[in-house]
Amino acid sequence: MKFEILKKIFIIVIIVILLVELVILLVVILVTILLVQGTRRIPVHTAKRVIGRGSRQALAGGQRSYIPLKINQAGVMPIIFAQALMFLPSLIFQNTSFGATFSNIQGFWYNAVFFLLIVVFTYFYTAIMMNPNQMADELKRNGSFIPGVKPGKKTADFIDGLISRLVFPGSIFLGIIAILPAFAMNFGVQQGFAYFFGGTSLLIMVGVVLDTLQQIESHLLNRHYDGLIKGGRIKGRSSASAVTMSQAL
């Protein structure tokens, strides 16, 4: 009788633990989606100008669009660069305590340094990918401007400030997602399942799924199946940014 009761309690505990792990995994996936999809839209106005001659003159421009700045402009590249560097101490300082410290992926110092490297590489990669001066020059050349901001250097400084404010939370969230598998393993989650809680695999999986859904939506729109997707528009990782940037510039 006691054995049956203990068996039932054990089964209930296992089910509760499994449900808690699934809920945490769902929350991590939702946060990852927000990280991949999160954007800050900069409104852009295009000045009206007269084109043509004589009776064929017409007004052009006057459009309103926006420049989307993603919270995570760097994607998974900072994690890849950081992982490549984290292998060096264990290779160079083999059979030493220092090398052993950076061989333990569940250790505190490994994950602390890994987190800091991701933050640094996020700033570095974003600085390479985004050029505020070039964006400001393109806006000025096409007769576009950001409301309330003077064209030229003021616009470049404004965009640069926004990018800097977006990169900080993006790098922090990216670093947290990268070290989540180590936290999961420290809490007793099996290594094979722990990697689903974060890292490059989760970011790539979420990005691929979002891109696939965006392509399916585009196909449905081309086939005039608007009624099937009235619930909302799906934004891919790159397509939405490319379209809005081309409209703005």
Image: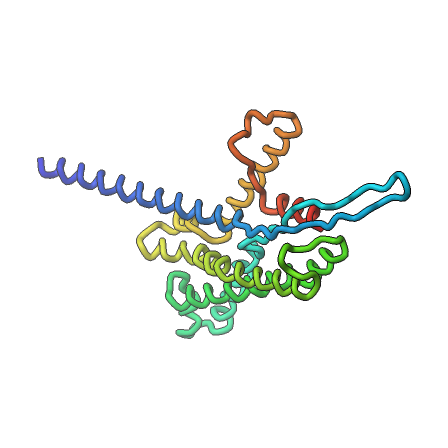
Q: Residue furthest front?
A: 55
* Quadrant of residue 132 within the rendered picture: bottom right
Q: Residue at x 39, y 57 (%)?
A: 182
Q: Position of residue 99 (x, y in %)?
A: 44, 71
Q: Position of residue 153 (x, y in %)?
A: 68, 66
Q: Residue furthest right?
A: 54
Q: Is residue 77 above or below residue 247?
A: below
Q: Is residue 61 above or below residue 152?
A: above
Q: Position of residue 15 (x, y in %)?
A: 27, 39
Colour scheme shown: rainbow
* Quadrant of residue 107 within the rendered picture: bottom left
Label count reads 0
Q: Residue furthest left?
A: 1
Q: Position of residue 27 (x, y in %)?
A: 39, 46
Q: Residue at x 38, y 51 (%)?
A: 191
**Observer-nearest residue: 61 or 172?**
61
* Quadrant of residue 8 within the rendered picture: top left
Q: Residue at x 41, y 48 (%)?
A: 28
Left or right, residue 184 beside residue 12: right
Q: Residue at x 31, y 44 (%)?
A: 20
**Observer-nearest residue: 122 or 182?**
122
Which quadrant, please, contains the N terminus? top left
Left or right, residue 103 beside residue 216: left
